[in-house]
């Protein structure tokens, strides 16, 4: 509930609507207590007095009645009728919808055909017909407005109920022997209530307008009783000579309906589960950067991309998740650097931080720098980053189906990726797209360019993803677990392809994975990440042969070897620490067999020896310790 209000009030317009509505409702509630004149007392001597006249703040109407008082009482009545109609329509309509949707079959057919018949009439005509049959009067107008809105609720709620009635938890309740009433009340109803509230919040404004419409036509509230519609109706004849008599109730209707609709939209957005999961908190175009960020200088001049002491955090409520806690990485031109670590170790966040792609909020880069061509990409203007994204530095993500647009042909998507950065003709881009498909070894590229993503296999789609990354001949490709979703044979093909492309194009690749087998196949160097920090780096061969960090050793021990004897595959016990409360000392300490008391205090530095570095006080291999 608190989360709902927070989300609701994050939407400024909805908050404004809520405040205005609260004021109007409050005024309507206290109207009887205010020292107002009697709204029905006529005084023909004081007809059509202008606003701000003595004793009449809003002036008087054609019978000399005080407009302020009539407005307040009228608003009270209009609101009451509108809300009552909405609640009646919602209750009856939803009940019909739930029953039809839940019992389905013949019950559904009979009920819904009847509802369809109601819907077949233009609905203001239907309302008029109902009032004509029942006779004019506010109560009958209320009934008419409620009645014409019942089909709307019934249809809406039936649709939702049909979806819910076939879900496992309802079946489970049936199996448990619950009766229909019990199931409807305890299983179905709670799931449709948000939809009912949404439907109500978006229609209540309409219902107030419809009631006012009927009163305007003289079919709703009867003289001398004031509601907003009848006030407008009575003022019609004096519209030109005394416009204030129309403007006062007209403006009130405008304010109420606007406020309700803004609030209603906000309620809908806040209750909609898809929007609730973050669609409303629009991330900024680049990751937010802390104003007190200390930009670190590059340590390596011949690197094409140099990540220095990068720190990326997620600030969620009052917690700080240090997803990346000071990472240093260098990639040389044409080199393939592997980043390996368990899930959640901060690999993806490191990769996304490079181009400012971490979602903010909650992401925030609090320190470090990413030097590319002598410039710091962190804090670079958005236009600059945009011109680099997909052009000089390209990404390949794990799930190509999520990155490809389902409704466009893959050839067109590739062409778009090219035309986004280069001014070339459509045909030229198209030809290049086919070339790209050929270069990622897709058979029959001309035809495949005409395919939609869903027509391709997983391996093919990932090839399209690679082709798209290659589209603008980037210097660097950052591949975030591109083969994790693929089976082993396709994975091997994709890795071989990436390796070939690297040599053909002289690409630098940052390859993220959790599989040392993949690293062994592809990477020149590897960096092992744990809890947001690099714990070991070095040439792939030396690390594989001679891991220094106990964590690296355990990771390597997880890779099965074909024909490699009867070695036991040991899973690493325990779980990585949660990054919002990292332990003091070595983050791996509590899972490490060799842990000593020194390991759990202070900061364990990264000790560098030649091309290797390790963050461990008691490394597995003596070599690193001696030369440190
Ligand atoms: P991986 O190494 O598996 O790619 P990630 O880089 O995705 O790991 O995540 C690193 C840490 O950052 C994890 O602990 C994760 O919970 C946290 N994290 C990632 N994205 C978000 C986010 N949008 N909001 C909050 N925490 C996040
Ligand atoms: Mg990841």
Image (tube, helix red, strand yellow):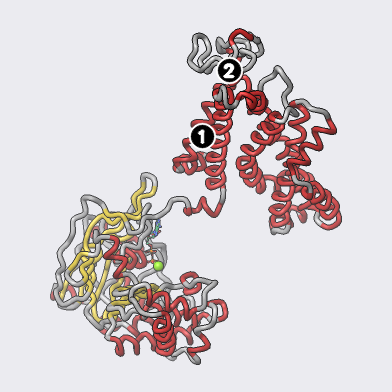
Which quarter of the figure is the C terminus placed in? bottom left
Q: Are marks 1 and 2 in contact (CB under 8 Å)?
A: no
Q: Residues within 10 Å of mark 1 (few under 14, many from 20)?
A: many
Residue 593 visible in this rendered orientation of the protein: no
* Percent coordinates x, y for residue 131 in the rendering: 80, 33
Q: Is residue 225 above or below residue 140?
A: above
Q: Is residue 293 above or below residue 591?
A: above
Q: Nearer the viewer, residue 293 or 566?
A: 293
**The quadrant where residue 438 appears:** bottom left
**The quadrant where residue 190 appears:** top right
Residue 310 visible in this rendered orientation of the protein: yes
Q: Earlier in the sequence, mark 1 or mark 2?
A: 1
Q: Is residue 162 above or below residue 28?
A: below
Regarding ligand 1, which quadrant of the image does it lie in?
Answer: bottom left
* Percent coordinates x, y for residue 454 in the rendering: 56, 77
Residue named by callout 1: 18
Q: Indicate left or right for 609 with 10 as reference.
A: left
Residue lying farthest to the front in this orientation: 241
Q: Nearer the viewer, residue 139 or 188?
A: 139
* Percent coordinates x, y for residue 266 in the rendering: 52, 43
Residue named by callout 2: 67
The residue shown at (69%, 59%) is: 168
The residue shown at (30%, 86%) is: 505
The residue shown at (71%, 46%) is: 152
């Amino acid at each position: 509930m608190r989360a709902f209000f927070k989300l609701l009030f994050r939407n400024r317009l909805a908050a404004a609507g809520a405040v205005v509505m609260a004021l109007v409702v409050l005024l309507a509630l206290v109207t009887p207590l205010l020292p107002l004149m009697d709204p029905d007392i006529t005084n023909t001597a004081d007809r059509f007095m202008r606003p701000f006249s003595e004793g009449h703040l809003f002036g008087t109407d054609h019978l000399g009645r005080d407009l302020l008082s009539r407005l307040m009482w009228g608003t009270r009545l209009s609101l009451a009728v509108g809300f009552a109609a909405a609640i009646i329509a919602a209750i009856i309509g939803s009940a019909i919808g739930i029953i039809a949707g839940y019992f389905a079959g013949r019950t559904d057919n009979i009920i819904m055909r009847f509802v369809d018949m109601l819907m077949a009439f233009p609905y203001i005509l239907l309302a008029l017909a109902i009032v004509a049959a029942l006779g004019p009067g506010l109560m009958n107008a209320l009934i008419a407005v409620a009645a014409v809105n019942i089909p709307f609720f019934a249809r809406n709620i039936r649709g939702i109920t049909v979806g819910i009635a076939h879900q496992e938890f309802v079946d489970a309740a049936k199996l448990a022997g619950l009766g229909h009433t019990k199931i409807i009340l305890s299983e179905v109803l709670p799931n449709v209530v948000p939809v009912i509230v949404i439907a109500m919040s978006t229609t209540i404004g309409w219902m107030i307008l419809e009631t006012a419409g009927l009163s305007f036509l003289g079919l709703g509230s009867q003289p001398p009783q004031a509601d907003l519609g009848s006030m407008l109706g009575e003022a019609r004849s004096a519209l030109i000579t005394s416009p204030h008599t129309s403007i006062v109730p007209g403006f009130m209707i405008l304010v109420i309906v606007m406020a309700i609709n803004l609030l209603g939209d906000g309620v809908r957005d806040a209750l909609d589960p898809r929007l609730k999961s973050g669609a409303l908190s629009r991330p900024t175009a680049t990751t937010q950067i802390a104003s007190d960020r200390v930009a670190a200088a590059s340590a390596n001049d011949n690197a094409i991309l140099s990540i220095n002491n990068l720190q990326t955090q997620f600030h969620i409520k009052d917690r700080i998740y240090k997803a990346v806690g000071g990472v240093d990485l260098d990639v040389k031109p044409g080199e393939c650097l592997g980043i390996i670590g368990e899930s959640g170790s901060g690999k993806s966040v490191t990769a996304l931080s490079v181009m400012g792609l971490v979602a903010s909020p909650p992401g925030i880069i609090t320190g470090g720098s990413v030097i590319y061509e002598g410039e710091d990409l962190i804090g670079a203007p958005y236009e600059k980053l945009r011109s680099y994204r997909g052009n000089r530095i390209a990404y390949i993500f794990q799930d190509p189906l999520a990155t490809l647009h389902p409704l466009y042909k893959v050839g067109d998507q590739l062409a778009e990726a090219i035309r986004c950065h280069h001014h070339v003709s459509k045909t030229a881009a198209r030809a290049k797209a086919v070339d790209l498909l050929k270069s990622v070894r897709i058979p029959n590229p001309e035809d495949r360019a005409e395919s939609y993503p869903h027509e391709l296999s997983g391996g093919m789609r990932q090839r399209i993803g690679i082709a798209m990354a290659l589209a603008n001949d980037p210097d660097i490709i950052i591949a975030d677990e591109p083969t994790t979703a693929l089976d082993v044979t396709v994975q091997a093909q994709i890795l071989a392809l990436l390796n070939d492309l690297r040599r053909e194009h002289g690409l630098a690749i940052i390859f993220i994975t959790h599989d040392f087998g993949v690293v062994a196949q592809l990477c020149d160097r590897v960096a092992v990440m744990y809890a947001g920090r690099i714990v070991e780096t070095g040439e792939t061969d030396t690390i594989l042969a001679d891991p220094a960090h106990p964590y690296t050793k355990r990771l390597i021990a997880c890779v099965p070897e074909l024909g490699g004897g009867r070695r036991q595959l040991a899973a690493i016990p325990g779980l990585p620490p949660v990054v919002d409360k990292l332990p003091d000392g070595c983050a791996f300490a509590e899972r490490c067999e060799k842990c000593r008391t020194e390991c759990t205090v202070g900061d364990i530095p990264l000790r560098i020896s030649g091309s290797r570095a390790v963050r461990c006080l008691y490394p597995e291999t003596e070599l690193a310790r001696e030369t440190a």
